[in-house]
Structures are given as C-alpha cells and as structure tokens.
C-alpha cells in the first residue's frame, strides 16, 4: 500500500481493486498511465507501462527516497523492487533475481538499466575503489553488449536481439564484487537479412559511420552502409541513432573493460569480414561454381589472416566423408550462397559469444574465499524477449514463446510458492488457490519423446530427405488429442490454418499459429553441418575432429580459421581438433535452447524472485496513446489478472506488526500514542477489534494478514482522518512552541537592550564624571575637555548638562570680578550677542574704559573733568557711560570737531575748543537706536524719537586706530537693558537717517589720500571718507 498517492492517480496496487475484473484492471492501468504513474504493484510485482518519454523519477533524490524503505512505504517504483531484492539478499543472505518480462519495446532493457543503476548507487558506502571498478565494469559492459546485440526494429529503436541474464555477486557487506552474464539465442538471422524499416545490429553501422578513415581503409571498407548487401536495407534508414558517437563510446567502453588493442582490432576485422562476405557473388561456368568478384577473396584472406585459396575453397566446396574416404564436393550456386550466409551468421554469433565471454573473464569474481569473505550472494537480472506473435511465426517465435511459457509457469509457481511459504512461516492455514497451470503447454513443447521439440529432433535425425511437411504430419500424428495443439488437418473447418503448413498452439497468452516452413533447416543448422565438413577437410591435420563437443547451445565452428590471428584462434578453439574425430551428432538448435531454458529456470527457481512486468502502451512510441486492445492483450498474456487473484485469494495485504502499528496506531485509543500491551501483536489485535475488522484478518507470527482491500481502505481512511487531526494538533503545539520561543527571545532581547542601555547611560555618566572631575583645578576650568558622545536617549540630557557646565564655567569666571569689571563684562557680552559676525574688530580683547576723553586729550582733561562734574551736579547722572572726541555733522550739514559724553541720562555734545562747553544734549530716553557700518570705520548714527539723528565719527583715539564702536554699542545696550529698554542696533551700509526731519543716507568710502576720516556732502546725504591703507 503505497503512501503519498491519492486515489486520483488510481490504485497503486491492483490488489486493492474493488472487483478483480479485466475492465477494472484496465481502467486503473489507463488512469495511472495518463496521470504519469507508470508503475503499479500487484503485491510485490511491479507492472510498468513504457512512458515513451523521459521521466524525472530516476535521479539521486528519488534513489534516496527508496533506499532502505519497505515496498509499500513509497509509491510503486522499480527502485522499490531493486531495494527489496537487495534487502532480501543482504538481510536474509538469500540469492535473489529480478525477472523482467514483456514484449519487445515494452521497456525491459531500460528497466534493467535503472535497476543496475540503483544497485550501483546504494552500494559501496565505504567507497572502496575495487567496488567502484566492478560497478563501472558492469555498467560499461552493457554499452558493448547493446552495440553488438541490439538493433533497430519496427517496434524498438534499441531492441535487444538476445536474451540476457546477468548475475551480480555481492560480498557479505553487500558490496558488488563481480558478475556474470549469460546470453540466450542471439537473433543471428538479422546479420544477413532485415525486415523493411529495420536495421542489422548497431555494431555494423557504428563501424561504417564512426571509424576513422585510416581504420576503414585498412579494413577495405567504404564509408557508406548502402554499399553492403547485408546492411543495405537498414543503411538507408534515417533515425535518431548517432552511430558515429556510439562508435567512440563503444570503443572506449571496450578499452575501459579491458579489451586489448589487438582484440578490438579483431572485432572490427570480423565485422568487416561479414560485410564483405555479403557482397560476394557466385556465378557458374557450366557445372563449375565460381566467385564472381574474386578480389573480395583476397580482402577476406587479409582480414582473416589466412591464405586466399583457403577462403575460396571453403566457400566453393564441401568435404564429405564416406567411410574412411574424404572427398571434396563442389557447391551448387545456391548452396554456396547459403553457405556464405551461414558462415556470416556463425561468425557474428561466435563474435558475440566471445565478447560475452571476454566480459565475463573480466567481471567474474576473483580471489573470493567464502571462509574469509563470508557467503557470496547474488542478485540476478533477467532481461529476456517477451511473447511474440507475428503475421508469420516461425521457429524463432516458437522458441521465444516457449521460453515465455516456461517463465510464466515459473512465475505463477513462485508467486504461489512464495505465498504458501509465507503462510507456513507465519503459521496461517493454507487454502488451496485455483490458478491456470500452463505446465501442460510447457510439456507439449519440451516433453521427451512426445513433445514438439522431440518430434522435430526425430525428424531431423531421419536419414534421407526430410521435409517440413513430414515434420507437421508427425506432429499431427502424435499430438492429435492434445487440447492445446491443432492444425488444419485436425480441425478442417479452421480457415485460418493452411494445410500442410501451419499448426496452432493455445498458449496461455493466446493462440499462435506457426508455419513449419524452415523448422527442419533451422533446427539442424544444416548448412553449418555441411560447412563444417567442408572446413575440416581444409585442415592440414589428417584426422577428423569433433566440432560439436561444446555443451552449450550456440556457436558452430568452422575450422577454416587456421589463422595467424591469436584472437581469432581463441574464438574458434575447436578448429585445432582433428578431422577424423568427428563422431558425435551435434545437438539441435531446439535441444540446445531447451537445455539452456531448463537450466535458466532452475537457476531462477533457486533464487527469491522479484518481477517487473512491462507493458507497451502503443506501437507508435507515443507518450500519450494508450491502445486499449493492445494493452489488454498484454495484461492477459502476462497473466496479470491471475496474479492479482492469487495474491487476493489469500490475503490482500500483510504487514509486520511494528510497521502496522506505526502506520495505524493513531486510530485507536489503545495504541495512541503508545500502547502498554505485552506485545505489538496484542496491540494490533486490540486495534483491529476496536475497528470491527476481527473477521477479516489473520494473525501470523510476525505479520498481520488482511484479507480484503476494503478493510485496508477503511483503515487508510480512518488514518487519513486522524492524520488531519494529528497534524492540527502538532501544528497547534508547534505553533505554541514557536510563539513561546519567539516571546522568550523577544523578552530576552528586551532585557538585553535594557541592560545595554543602562550600561551605556552609566558608562556615559561615568565617563563625563571622569573627564570633568578635576575641572576646578584646571586652568581653563575644563573648557578644553572633549565631551563624550552620549547615547541617543541622553542627547537632551547632554544639552542640559553642557548648559549647567557652561553656566558653572561662566560663573567661575565672573564670580571674583569687581562691580566695575562686571559692568564691563556685561557690555562685552551685549556687544558679542548683538554684533558677532557683523563687524570685524569689536575691541573685546582690551579693557573697556568708557570715559576716554581724559586719556585721549590729557592736556584738556582737567577742563573736561570740571564740566563733567558740573553736569553731574546739574543733571544728577550716576555715571559716565562713554566719552570720546568725534567729528560731527552740524545743522548746516558741515563737519566739525566735537566731544561726545554719554551718561546714564544724557548724550552731550561738547566743544573741545571751548573747554568742553556743553553744546546740546539729547536725553537718553529720546534715543531709539544706533546704526553702524559693517566696515572698520568709527561711524555711528544715533537715532532719536524726534528724527534729529546724530551722525558722528569717533576720532582722536589713543592709541590711534583703536576701535571703540563695539564698546559704545555694548555699553549702551547693557545700560538700556538694565533700564529694561530696547535699543535698536543696525549694522548696515549705507545708513539711512533723518537730519532735522529730512531723510538722507551716509555712505563710507575709502580714499587713498585721505589722512583723517571726514564727512562731505553728497546728493543723497553724506559721504564719510576714510583713509585707505
Ligand atoms: N522508463 C522509461 N522511461 C523512458 N523511456 C522508456 C522507459 N522504458 C522504455 N522507454 C523507451 O522505450 C524504448 C524501448 O525500451 P527497451 O527497454 O529497449 O525495450 P525492450 O528491452 O523491452 O525491448 C527505449 O528506447 C525508450 O525510448
Ligand atoms: Mg531490450
């Protein structure tokens, strides 16, 4: 029961069909094919439908999914079968085999390759180089075998034209250590003839199309397959096969496998020999038969490393032994052609057998000691031709169908036997199962004395002329009563059978009519017999030899090759036997085939078998087409329905107790999540009782057996239902866990963040502390100390801190100052706040003395002091803010020298020439603002409420060039501030003012030859000219 496949893909196991009927079977097969599910089980048998397209199901990840899994745990797949065979081999130390059957083009060879690849992929975990080498050999040998044994047919572009059984040997660890290949019945007739649309074996085209020019020259071969009679037909076929690339691949593979250069050369020489043989033409001159194109004879002599005369004689004569005499008898034209073709076929067959033998030499297990290495176990893979029914069925089809008959018999027997053995092992009573037993047909073919093969052999042994019709008559005589045999003579009304030509067998797979034409010849391999006699006459050795001593069916053995080529010699070992030793009659083709089949079946029967049953969905290699009738016929003759019945007759499903529990334990409260019963078996019983399936199951020793598929479906349904809930439950728990985890992580993060912030704050404060700790003692009270960068949260705090510090710092600076100094500082601050960046020299660096007149004009200081005291008395001012000599513009727009005295109450203009006689005063509350220029000049305009602005330029400073504008503005500002009044200060050029109510401007200009600053009248007002420097 495969998981992960919903019913939309049909049933993964035919055993689970509701009714076992051909209709349901076909419907399921079709549905799965259409859904791209090419594999379906019947219990442990895989039914495979050729997809005719690349399937993405053989990759590394798929292999991983099947590795070590039980069959029903994953969707049906070849890999599951391969794994089961491998597990049985490894776990139970059993030899196993995988039998792949199906008709030509059904996908047997591909399946065998995937199986090999799977086994190669899952073995050798310890990566031993030797194991890798063996695996590589096994995979590579396939490439060579396919080149020589496969051909394009109308059914399959890469049809295997031989049966193949391959053993892979494993050591006790389950690593492959070698292998062996048996080949069966190569279709050698293809060497000389192909149906329309078909080709000869790939090897010929590979040679002609792919070999380098030099090599072709040495073989006397042209690069044109249509130049050679034997492959001409196939040479014209356009196909997707890339022969020249394959030539390289095959040559490389032969090298990798270990063929020597000489051996490879000989292989190609033999192929060339066959091509040339095909072009030989015989003619006749009277009674004498000749070779028309005798040039070819020397080509053949060259290729076979033998003398031209030997070749010619072998082709034109045969040697007949009469008693002790040996004579040469010339062939007729016809006989010579026949002999030539037989020779071609024989050489090719011998070559093929030799290649298989060579591969076997190389891959066979070496240096294996069972005492040291443990038991050596085997997995066999059988890829053999399937049942064939053609328009005209001859001896070959008869052999092939007999082979399938035997394999089918084995299949049914073993499936049954396996079931029976399993029941016995598990202690479950065995119930007899009725099935179609085709032993009767097997017997019809192979039984001694009575069987068709026996009758054929008997006919062949008769002396004198025996015809195919005589053989048919003998059959009719012997088998008249047989239920599975008939012919026109026995059922005269049957128009489908031809008199004296056809007989029909009721195979398990269907009725097949065979034409007896050619049976006798093919069975005798007649021409080979003649040819051999001919050949050993050629031998220089005097006595007769036995050419047919070998036990295996196959290769005939002309001894013409007294060749100096050692590889060729090795291919024809019996060539060295003496002529006179010929005594035994060779075994017939039928007998050889029968023997090889019997031994094959014996071999398979001794192993635990696994089956892959391949079905070909259509004849046009289409990935979409499912031809119902075609498939139905295959299902019938593969006995698949039978298989399902056998499998269901007992129990449709069986599972190990622990596995069963693992799968279904959620559907019972006794078993979920874990049971506390004494054994898994008890737990399974409890579970099934709970579900009410008690009547439908049997309890084996290790497995529970379930009779009907319904029960399994029901279990599956309940499981699916519960799985949903379990999934929800798991999701719930898991989501909760996730959320809690996330919450914990977030909280932890918060704590960390908080701690970190606190740490940052603390370390900031600590750092501030550290840096500012000693600022009191520092010269600049810590002004130079760099502030540490605060964390973001403390930016405002830092501002406040800096503010505090700055205040403290300011305070430390001013706290010891006298009131006078303080006044000065205030004024300077006022200047700075008001004019910073607006004028160059603010005079901040020097002491601000304010009352400069005394200092600037020491000669007249006493008069000034007198006037000043008078004014103080009169106007009651508290202090002098500023005094200085000025140049001023008078009422008549004329410039004149004056002195300026500003007290906290008035602004006085004085005449310095007249002992500082006060001229006019402006009450300070009348002053609204002052304007100054942005330059270096000492111009200042006092604005008054009554628009009688005062325009002056400070002058006569000591030292000269002192700038006092800053001081004047600052002192006024500071004073106004102390009186809580506003003073408007403009730094601007030109300065706008009103003189006696008239608007005018004052512009400052630099003049080179000006010695003192002075005013002149201009159109719009006044110009203050200052000296340039
Ligand atoms: N599993 C598969 N996936 C894709 N193509 C396949 C598969 N099996 C068979 N085929 C196609 O069918 C062709 C015939 O298969 P092959 O195995 O040679 O048939 P058989 O050996 O039964 O005569 C292959 O050449 C290939 O194109
Ligand atoms: Mg094949």
Image: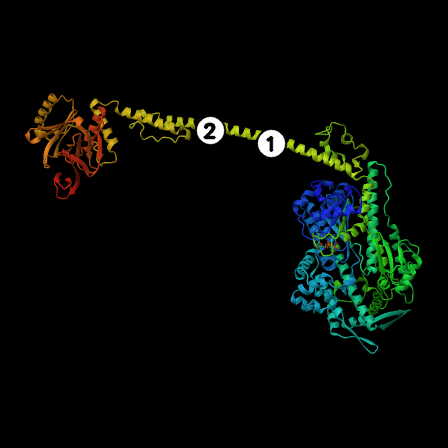
Q: What residue is pinned by disc 1?
A: 735
The spot of residue 629 in percent (x, y) is 77, 53
The spot of residue 932 in percent (x, y) is 19, 35
Q: Is residue 261 visible?
A: yes
For numbered disc 2, what is the local secondary structure?
helix
Q: Quadrant of residue 294?
A: bottom right
Residue furthest to the left in view is 914
Name the foreground residue: 98 vs 264. Answer: 98
Q: Is residue 841 left or right of residue 411?
A: left
Q: For label 2, count other residues whose C-alpha is less than 10 Å away and answer few (under 14), some (14-19) or many (20+).
A: few
Q: Earlier in the sequence, mark 2 or mark 1?
A: 1
Q: Is residue 487 left or right of residue 188?
A: right
The spot of residue 468 in percent (x, y) is 88, 64
Q: Residue at x 9, y 23 (%)?
A: 870
Q: Are marks 2 and 1 in contact (CB under 8 Å)?
A: no
Picture colour scheme: rainbow
Q: For label 1, count other residues whose C-alpha is less than 10 Å away and answer few (under 14), some (14-19) or many (20+).
A: few
Q: What residue is pinned by disc 2?
A: 756
């Amino acid at each position: 029961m495969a998981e992960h496949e919903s019913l939309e893909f049909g049933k993964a196991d035919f055993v689970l069909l509701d009714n076992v009927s051909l209709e349901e079977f076909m419907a399921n097969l079709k549905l799965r094919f259409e859904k791209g599910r090419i594999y379906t089980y019947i219990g442990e048998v895989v039914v495979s439908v050729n997809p005719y397209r690349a399937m993405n199901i053989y990759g590394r990840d798929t292999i991983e999914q099947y590795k070590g899994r039980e069959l029903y745990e994953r969707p049906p797949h070849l890999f599951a079968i391969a794994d089961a065979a491998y597990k049985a081999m490894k776990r139970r130390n059993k030899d196993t085999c995988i039998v792949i059957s199906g008709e030509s083009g059904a996908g047997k060879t591909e399946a065998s390759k995937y199986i090999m690849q799977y086994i190669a992929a899952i073995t050798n975990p310890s990566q031993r180089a030797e194991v890798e080498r063996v695996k590589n050999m096994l995979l590579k040998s396939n490439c060579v075998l396919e080149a020589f044994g496969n051909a394009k047919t109308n059914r399959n572009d890469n049809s295997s034209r031989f049966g193949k059984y391959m053993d892979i040997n494993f050591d006790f660890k389950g690593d492959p250590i070698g292998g062996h290949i048996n080949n069966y019945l190569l279709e050698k007739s293809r060497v000389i003839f192909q149906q329309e649309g078909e080709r000869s074996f790939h090897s010929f085209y590979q040679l002609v199309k792919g070999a380098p020019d030099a090599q072709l020259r040495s073989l006397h071969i042209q690069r044109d397959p249509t130049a050679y009679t034997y492959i001409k037909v196939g040479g014209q076929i356009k196909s997707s096969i890339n022969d020249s690339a394959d030539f390289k691949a095959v040559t490389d593979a032969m090298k990798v496998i270990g063929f020597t250069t000489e051996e490879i050369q000989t292989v190609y020489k033999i192929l060339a020999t066959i091509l040339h043989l095909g072009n030989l033409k015989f003619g006749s001159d009277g009674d004498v038969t000749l070779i028309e194109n005798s040039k070819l004879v020397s080509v053949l002599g060259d290729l076979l490393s033998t003398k031209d005369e030997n070749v010619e004689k072998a082709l034109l004569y045969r040697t007949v032994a009469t008693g002790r005499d040996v004579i040469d008898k010339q062939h007729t034209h016809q006989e010579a052609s026949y002999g030539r073709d037989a020779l071609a076929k024989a050489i090719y067959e011998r070559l093929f057998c030799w290649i298989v033998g060579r591969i076997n030499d190389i891959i066979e297990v070496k240096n294996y000691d069972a005492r040291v290495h443990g038991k050596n176990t085997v997995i066999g893979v059988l890829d053999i031709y399937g049942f064939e029914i053609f328009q005209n069925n001859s001896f070959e089809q008869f052999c092939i169908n007999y082979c399938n008959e035997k394999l089918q018999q084995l299949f049914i027997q073993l499936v049954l036997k396996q079931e029976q053995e399993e029941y016995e092992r598990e202690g479950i009573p065995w119930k007899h199962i009725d099935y179609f037993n085709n032993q009767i047909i097997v017997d019809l073919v192979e039984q001694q004395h009575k069987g068709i093969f026996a009758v054929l052999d008997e006919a062949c042994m008769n002396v004198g002329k025996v015809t195919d019709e005589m053989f048919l008559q003998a059959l009719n005589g012997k088998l008249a009563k047989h239920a599975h045999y008939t012919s026109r003579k026995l059922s005269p009304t049957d128009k489908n059978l031809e008199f004296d030509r056809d007989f029909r067998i009721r195979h398990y797979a269907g009725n097949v009519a065979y034409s007896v034409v050619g049976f006798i010849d093919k069975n005798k391999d007649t021409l080979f017999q003649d040819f051999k006699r001919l050949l050993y006459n050629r031998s220089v050795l005097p006595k007769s030899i036995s050419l047919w001593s070998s036990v295996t069916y196959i290769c005939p053995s002309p001894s013409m090759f007294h060749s100096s080529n050692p590889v060729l010699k090795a291919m024809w070992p019996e060539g060295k036997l003496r002529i006179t030793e010929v005594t035994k009659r060779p075994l017939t083709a039928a007998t050889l085939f029968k023997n090889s089949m019997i031994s094959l079946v014996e071999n398979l029967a001794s192993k635990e078998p696994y089956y892959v049953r391949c079905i070909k969905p259509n004849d046009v290699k289409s990935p979409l087409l499912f031809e119902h009738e075609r498939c139905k016929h295959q299902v019938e003759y593969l006995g698949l329905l039978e298989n399902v019945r056998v499998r269901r007759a007992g129990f449709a499903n069986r599972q190990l107790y622990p596995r069963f529990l693992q799968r279904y334990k959620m559907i019972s409260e006794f078993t979920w999540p874990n049971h506390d019963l004494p054994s898994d078996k008890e737990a399974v019983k409890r579970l099934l009782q709970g579900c009410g399936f008690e009547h439908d199951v049997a309890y084996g020793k290790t497995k529970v057996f379930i009779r009907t598929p319904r029960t399994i479906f029901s279990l599956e349904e309940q499981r699916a239902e519960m799985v949903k809930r379990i999934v929800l439950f798991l999701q719930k728990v898991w989501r909760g866990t996730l959320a809690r985890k996330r919450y914990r992580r977030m909280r932890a993060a918060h704590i960390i963040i908080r701690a970190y912030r606190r740490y940052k704050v603390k370390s900031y404060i600590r750092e501030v502390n550290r840096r500012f700790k000693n600022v009191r003692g520092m010269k600049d009270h810590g002004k130079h100390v760099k502030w540490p960068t605060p964390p973001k949260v403390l930016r405002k705090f830092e501002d406040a801190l800096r503010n505090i510090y700055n205040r403290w710092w300011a305070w430390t600076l001013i706290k010891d100052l006298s009131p006078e100094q303080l006044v000065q500082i205030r004024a300077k601050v006022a200047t700075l706040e008001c004019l910073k960046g607006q004028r160059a020299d603010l005079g901040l660096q020097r002491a601000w003395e304010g009352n400069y007149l005394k200092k600037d004009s020491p000669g007249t200081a006493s008069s000034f002091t007198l006037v000043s005291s008078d004014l103080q008395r009169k106007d009651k001012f508290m202090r002098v803010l500023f005094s200085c000599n000025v140049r001023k513009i008078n009422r008549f727009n004329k410039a004149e020298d004056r002195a300026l005295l500003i007290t906290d109450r008035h602004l006085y203009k004085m005449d310095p020439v007249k002992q500082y006689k006060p001229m006019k005063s402006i009450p300070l509350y009348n002053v609204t603002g002052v304007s100054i220029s942005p330059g270096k000049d000492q111009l200042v305009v006092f604005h008054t409420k009554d628009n009688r602005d005062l325009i002056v330029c400070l002058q006569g400073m000591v030292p000269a060039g002192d700038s006092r504008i800053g001081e004047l503005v600052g002192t006024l500002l500071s004073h106004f501030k102390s009186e809580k009044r506003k003073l408007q200060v403009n730094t601007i050029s030109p300065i706008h003012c009103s003189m006696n109510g008239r608007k005018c401007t004052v512009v400052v200009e630099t003049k080179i030859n000006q010695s003192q600053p002075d005013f002149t009248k201009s159109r719009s007002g006044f110009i203050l000219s200052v000296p340039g420097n």
